[in-house]
Amino acid sequence: MKKNTQKRKNIITGSKLWSIAMITSLLAACSTPATTSNTANAAVSTTGTTKIVSVSESTSVKYADLVSLDADDTNVSWTEADSTMIKLNSTSATITGSGAKAASGSVTISEAGTYVLSGELTDGQIVVNVADKGVVHLVLNGATIHDNDSAGIYIQKAGKAVITLEKGTKNAVSDGKTYVYADSSTDEPDAAIFSKADLTFNGAGQLTVTGNYNEGITSKDDLKIISGSINVKAADDGIKGKDMVAIQAGTITVDATGDGIKSTNDTDTSKGFVAIADGTFNIQSGSDGIQAETALVTDGGTYNIVTAGGSANAPAKVEEGPGGGMGFGGGRGGFGGDGAMNGGTPPTDMGTPPDGEPPADMPAMPGSSSSNTGTQTGNNTTANVGTKATTSSSGTSATSTNSAAPTSSSAAAAKADSNADADNATTTTEEESTSAKALKAGADLTVNGGTYTIDSMDDSLHSNSNVTVNDGTFTIQSGDDGIHADQALTINGGTVKITKSYEGLEGAIITLNDGDVDVTASDDGVNAAGDLATSDQAAGTTDKAASDGISATDASKATTGTTAATSTTGTNAKATDANQQNRGPGGMPGESSGNNELHINGGSLTVNAGGDGLDANGSITMTGGTVIVNGPTNNGNGALDYDGTFVISGGYLVAAGSSGMAQGTSDASTQNTIVMTFPETQKAGTLVHVQDSKGNNILTFAPAKDYQNVVVSSPDLAKDGSYVIFSGGTSTGKAVNGLYTGGTYSGGTQIVAFQSTSNVTWVNESGVTTARSGMGGFGGGGQGGFGGGRNRSQSGTSTDTTGTTSTTGTTGTTDSAK
C-alpha cells in the first residue's frame, strides 16, 4: 500500500541556546525575504497607497468547464431482447445471448453491447476484454460478485465500460485479502472493481464494494459517477481514477484506510483532476478525504469527512515563539521590565536608544528567515506485508501470492512528547507522517457551493497552489490549518466556521472579498505567509504543458484557469510610512518585511486566536467589511502582527488582546484608528465603550478573552475628534460576536477622555501617548525596552488633554455602531 507522506522536521532546542532561541522566535511571524513574485486566482497588487484587487474569471471555474458527458455515460435503458442476460449461480453462470462465455467460474465478455447480470457469483470474476475497443454496458440487476484471489469485475480492454445500477436493486462486488498473479512482475488488477478503460457508473440502484486486498474502485483512465448509491470499504484507497474523477450526483460512502476519493495523473497537467457537481458524501479515510493530483472543483453537494480519526488525533503542536512568563517579551522581566509589560509607566532610567538600534551587548540576530517553531511528532506505523510488494524485508523476491491487507493509518500520528529534556543540546530528526487532509489539490482548489462538515487530522482545505471559495457552508475542525493555500487564498462568499485549528486561514496572499468567516485557532487566526511562486515557476507549468503536447488553454482549464499577477506590496513600507521604515522583528534593523499580503475588502471576519490574530509576513490592507479579533492573552503575540504596513481605508475593525506586542494601523491609512492600552488586564466579557464628545457610540464591544489593548477603526472616527473610553457597564443593544449595535450603553467607568491628534491615536489612562508603531520589542508593551515598536523607541510620555481618569459612571448613551 502506498502511503501519502510528508516529511516534517522536529527541532528541540536546549537551554544552552536559550537566548538565541528566544530571539529567533521573535522572527517567527515576519521573516520571508522581499521578492517580486507571481500569484494567482485573485490578482492583487499594491503600489504606494493605491490598491488594486481584481478577482480573476478563473475563480468561477465549474464542473461543466472540466467534464463533458456523452450519451453512453447517461444511458440507463435496456431491454431483455436487446441484451445478453447473465444469471450468476455460485461458481457458474447461465448466459442467454451472444458476446459472453462462462468458464472456470468466471464470465468473459468479448464483444461490445449490453449485459445484464443477476444472481450471485461466490468465487469468480466478470472479465471484459473487447478487442475492438467498443462500449460495454454492464447492468447490475441484483448481482453479487466475489472473487477470492482477484478483482470481482475486471475491465481488461474496452473503449469504455458503463456500469448501471438498476433502480430498486442491491448489488455487491468484493475481492479476497490475497491475490494470485500470473508472475511476480504483475501487480494488476488491485481493486475489487478494476478498469484499464474509461469507467462510468449510473443508475438509481445500490452498490456495495469491498476492497479487502487493496482498493475499492479503480480506473486507469477516466472515472465518472453520474448517479446511484455507492458504498465502498477499502484496505487502501476507496475510489481512484487516473485521468479524472468526475461525480455529477449520487450518494457516496467511503471507509478507506488510505485516501477516500482521488485522481493520480501527475504527468499531464490537463488531467488528474477531481470535479464534483453535486451529491452526498460520507467519507472516513486514514489519509486524505478527497485528493486531486491537479485541480479539485466542487460546485455543490453535502460532505461529511473525517480523516485519520479527526482533529483529536493530530500531532501535538507547541509554538516555541515568545510568550508569557519570564524572559524577552514575557509577562514580566526581560528588557522593558514589569511596568512596561503591564501597561504602566515605564522606568525612567532606561534612556532612549537610537531608533531601532540595540545595545552593544545584544546577541546577533539570526540571518535566515524564521523556521516554523511548532513541534510536530508522530510515529506512523503501517503494516505493508504482501500488498503488491516485489521484494520482502530480507531482500528476496516475493511470491506472486500477496497477503495481509494494510492496517489503518487513522491513528498514525502519535502525540508529541511534552516532557522533552530542556537541557539537551539541539537535535534534529526527520519523520514520515501521513497526509490526512479533507479536500486536497495539487493545483487549484475551487469551491463554488455545498455544505461541508469536516473533522480532519491535517488541513481541512489544502492546495499546493491556490484556494478559491466562492460559496458554500463550512463547519471545520482541523488538527492543522483550517484552509491552506501555498499561494493565493481567496474567499468571495459563503459561510466558513472553523471551530478548531492550529492556524485558521493560511496563504501567501489572502483576500477576503465577501462571506462570513469565523475562525478559532490555537496559534494564528489568519496568517499571510509562505514563499510566492516566481514568474519562472509559473512559466514552468506552461512550458511543461507545451512539452507534453497540451495547449495552454487546456492546461489552464485543468488547473482552473489560474492567471498570474505580480505582488509588490512588500515594497510599500519604505515608501508609504516613514514611521515604519526598516521594521525588523523586535525592533532590529536590517530585516526587510516580507511580500505576503492580507487584503480585506468586504464580508465579515471574526477571529479567536491563541497566537496572532491577523498575521502578515508583509502588509495588510482593508477597504471594507467587518473584522473582529479576539487576540492572544500572552504578551508574546498580538491581535495584529505585520511587518510592512496596515493601511485601512474603509470597513470596521476592532481587535482586542494583550499589550506586549500590540500594533495599530499605519499612518498611511485614510481611515482613523484609536489604539487603547488599559492600565491593567481586563477580564473577558468586560465591555469597552468608545463614544464621541456628543455621546454618539463609536464602539461597544465585549471581548471573548482577557485583554489589555484594543484597536478600533471606524468611518465614524475623526482625525481631530474628542472621545471618551469607558470600561465595564452594560448595553441593551444586540451583540453579534461581542460587537453591540443599537440599544443604550450605561454604567461603565470612564478610563480616559482625549482629543484625537492624528489618524492613528495611541492612548492610555493618562491620555494621548507618543505613537508606538509595531511590536513591543524585547519587553513588549508600554515602553517596550530598546526596540520600542520593532525599531522605534517610545518615550512613554502622555498628554492629558481632558484631565485625569474619571470613575464616574456614564449616563445613558445610544449605541449606533456601524
Image (cartoon, helix red, strand yellow):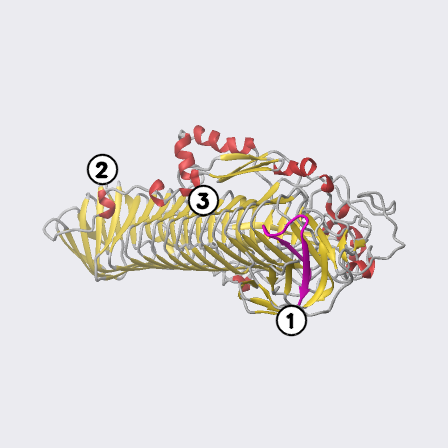
Q: Which residues are magenta?
A: 707-729
Judged from the image, the secondary structure of the residue bearing numbered disc 3 is loop
Precedes in sequence: disc 1 or disc 2:
2
Residue under pointer 2? 132
Give coordinates of residue 399: x percent, y percent.
43, 51
Q: Residue furthest toward the front?
A: 694
Marks 3 and 1 sit apart, C-alpha to C-alpha, by: 59 Å
Judged from the image, the secondary structure of the residue bearing numbered disc 1 is loop
Judged from the image, the secondary structure of the residue bearing numbered disc 2 is loop
Residue under pointer 3? 293
Q: Residue furthest toward the right?
A: 349
Marks 1 and 2 sit apart, C-alpha to C-alpha, by: 86 Å
Image quarter hosting the C terminus: bottom right
| Left or right: where 743 falls relative to 769 | left
In front: label 3 or label 1:
1
Q: Amino acid at mark 1?
A: Gly
Precedes in sequence: disc 3 or disc 1:
3
Precedes in sequence: disc 3 or disc 2:
2
Give coordinates of residue 750: x percent, y percent.
70, 65
Q: Amino acid at mark 2?
A: Asp
Density class for disc 2 (Cα within 10 Å; few <14, some 14-19, many ≥20) is few
Residue under pointer 1? 747
Density class for disc 3 (Cα within 10 Å; few <14, some 14-19, many ≥20) is many
Q: Is residue 677 magenta?
A: no
| Left or right: where 158 falls relative to 25 | left
Between residue 618 and residue 401, name the one nearer to us: 618
Density class for disc 1 (Cα within 10 Å; few <14, some 14-19, many ≥20) is some
In front: label 1 or label 2:
1
